[in-house]
Amino acid sequence: MITGEARVVTNKEVKPGYYCLRLHAPQIARMALPGQFALLRCTTGNATDPLLRRPLSFHKVLRQLGEVSFLYQVKGKGTKELSRFVPGQTVSVIGPLGRGFRLPSIGPIAVIAGGVGVAPLVYLAQMANEQGLEIYTFLGARSSDNLLADPDLVAASTSFFRATDDGTQGFKGTIVELLNQAADQITTCTAAYICGPEPAMAAAVSVCKKLGVPCQVSIESVMACGVGACLGCTCRTTRSTKYSRVCTEGPVFDGMEVIFDDHL
């Protein structure tokens, strides 16, 4: 784990309300694994509001350039402040943190993302592609304005499927409806990787369970410390402790062990 200042290379709005922040952080870039995250301070100077850092999954890692990037949606004060950073400024970063994805030795694999849940899955897909695994990608969103079809993810995928609730791009319907239509392909997968809004993740896990496909999910949570001390980011699991810390025992969990409240 590294704590330090990282220089902003770019911080671009890729779609209305969605930004990609690229930082020069060579030590973190050498260590970061798919599914891990970093804690970013959203203020500059002596400002303390917002006080808590924001946890963001690694979106891409360019080790040769010593750079990492984060895809995020502007939702509140913290991410709004983060969107104001410009090239040349520095961001205080702690990372890499957490437990990442585990890739199988053989494929194909399924990558399933809803909305900005695609953030941690691009780096995963790139690494899977480098290992020669076939990748079936399923990307869903409310409309084409929210569909974050990253070109690198498209390039890494053997097959790429899009779904929008309003039909403005790809299949008209939810990503879960798309998954049910593509059941024959998903059944051939050795593993599935899921991230997105909790109800969509819960439904996607249910589909994988029905089809007998092991799956891993990336859980999002508000965090204070990021190292397991404050116990403020727990989620319900089937483990003997009943609750697991997202920051240290996750953010990646076996999909079958997460209890998604009333969604499953």
Image (cartoon, rainbow, N blue to C red):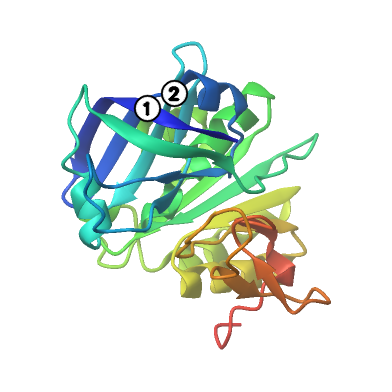
- Figure disc tally: 2
> Where is 53 relative to 237, above or below?
above
Where, quadrant-wise, is the C terminus in this rendering? bottom right
Residue at point 44%, 31% (across, down): 4
The location of residue 116, given as percent across then percent down, is 37, 53
Question: Relative to the observer, which residue lies in front, 251 or 129?
Answer: 251
What's the amino acid at mark 1? Answer: Ala
Q: Secondary structure at mark 1?
A: strand
User: Between disc 2 and disc 1, whose residue precedes?
Assistant: 1
The location of residue 232, given as percent across then percent down, is 54, 70
> Where is 114 relative to 259, above or below?
above
The location of residue 7, given as percent across then percent down, is 32, 24
Would residue 166 be found to the left or right of residue 120 on screen?
left
User: Tags 2 and 1 in contact by the CB under 8 Å rule?
Assistant: yes
> Could you say which disc has been placed on residue 25 in the image?
2
What is the residue that sits farthest to the bottom in this orientation?
Answer: 262
- Picture quarter containing residue 226? bottom right
What's the amino acid at mark 2? Answer: Ala
Q: Residues within 10 Å of mark 1 (few under 14, many from 20)?
A: many
Residue under label 1: 6
The location of residue 114, given as percent across then percent down, is 42, 59
What is the residue that sits farthest to the front in this orientation?
Answer: 46
Residue at point 74%, 79% (across, down): 242
Measured in 3D between alpha carbons, the distance from the residue under mark 2 to the one under mark 1, in whole angstroms, is: 5 Å
Residue at point 69%, 40% (across, down): 108
Question: Relative to the observer, which residue lies in front, 163 or 114?
Answer: 114
Work out whether residue 168 can be spotted. no
